[in-house]
Amino acid sequence: MTTTPTTSATSPPSGTPPPATASPAVRAGSGPWQLARAELRRRTSVKLSLAVVAFFALMTVAAPLIGSLGGWGPEEFDKSAVDPYLGGLPIGPLGGVSAEHWLGVEPITGRDLFARVVHGAQVSLLIAFSATAIVVVAGTAAGIAAGYFGGRVDTVLSRLMDLTMSFPSLIFMIAMMSVARDVNRIVLMTAVIGLFGWPGIARVVRGQTLSLKHREYVDAARVGGSGPWRILARDILPGVAGPVIAYTTLIVPGMIATEAALSYLGVGVRPPTPSWGQMIAESVAYYDTDPMYFLVPSLCLFLTVLAFTLLGDALRDILDPRGSGT
């Protein structure tokens, strides 16, 4: 009598690939934020982006201290660093780079580029971060209110979103900045940029709220006697936090670029207060004779926008995979 080989109940059938093993960083019982942190640590691009963001954030916070390391203020003139017989071009290679002026000097004025770039980062990023905060707070509040309460509240807020998004925002910003002259330019730019940015994130939050307000735990809280504001704070807001954080990092590069564009067009921060957009606008006339004057602020602007964009893409893929389009 012939015997047929038996297959163990615990071994996989022939031809079946072995089960995938979980990543060491992903353990059973890990929450979404733990999984997100583990995934972010795994990506080299995220680590580099965080390093760049941290560097420029530190530059923003400690601009006076960092700028003083070079020994020059952002508005100090050094006529000995420029050649009056060559139209005020910097003396020395690479736009006057030396031990005294680490990134060179501005043509004609001789102002130190290192000090100007550091203080320009404080102005540019302060406006961008402040405008982003306005956009996130206003957009999240409007989106949650429209999605949760519905009815007339949703109708009014949705029409207001459509109305705001229908404006040609850049043209309207230029007009408003040109008319309002005798006001604090930094405060005005922050308010104007924030005014036109909130509808985008409001739409994202509204859609997320619509999908959350009929979940079982929200219905249980409502049946248990919780009021609408308590439900919004304890149940809805934590549910939309992931997409909001992801889209916030994607908003920041646009805010930085908008501030730079307004300053480049001459309706932003006024001289002698430095900003990256203003420095780029002033350096265009010297791009062929003094390329360092153009490259230094342009490179800072490029690295900051790129770092926030890569970080925002990674956070969106992890925290809001439905919004990544993959």
Image (cartoon, rainbow, N blue to C red):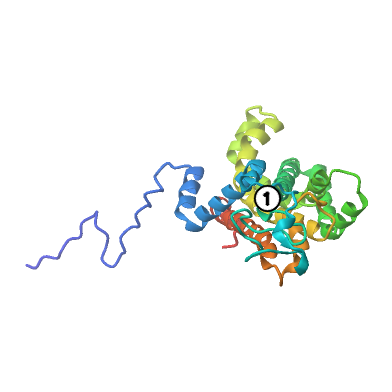
Q: Which residue is outermost to the top?
A: 225
Left or right of 218 in this view: 188: right
For the C terminus, the quadrant is: bottom right
Q: At 60% from the left edge and 33% from the top edge, which residue is drawn?
A: 220
Relative to 154, say whether 14 is above or below: below
Give the labeled residue for mark 1. 115
Foreground residue, 31 or 198?
Answer: 198
Q: Position of residue 104 (x, y in %)?
A: 65, 59
User: Which corner quadrant of the image does residue 66 belong to?
Assistant: top right
The answer to whether residue 244 is visible is yes
Q: Which residue is outermost to the left?
A: 1
Q: At 70% from the left edge and 52% from the top edge, which residue is drawn?
A: 116
Left or right of 281 in this view: 38: left
Q: Position of residue 14 (x, y in %)?
A: 26, 66
Q: Position of residue 127 (x, y in %)?
A: 74, 47
Which kind of residue does numbered mark 1 sit on?
Answer: Ala
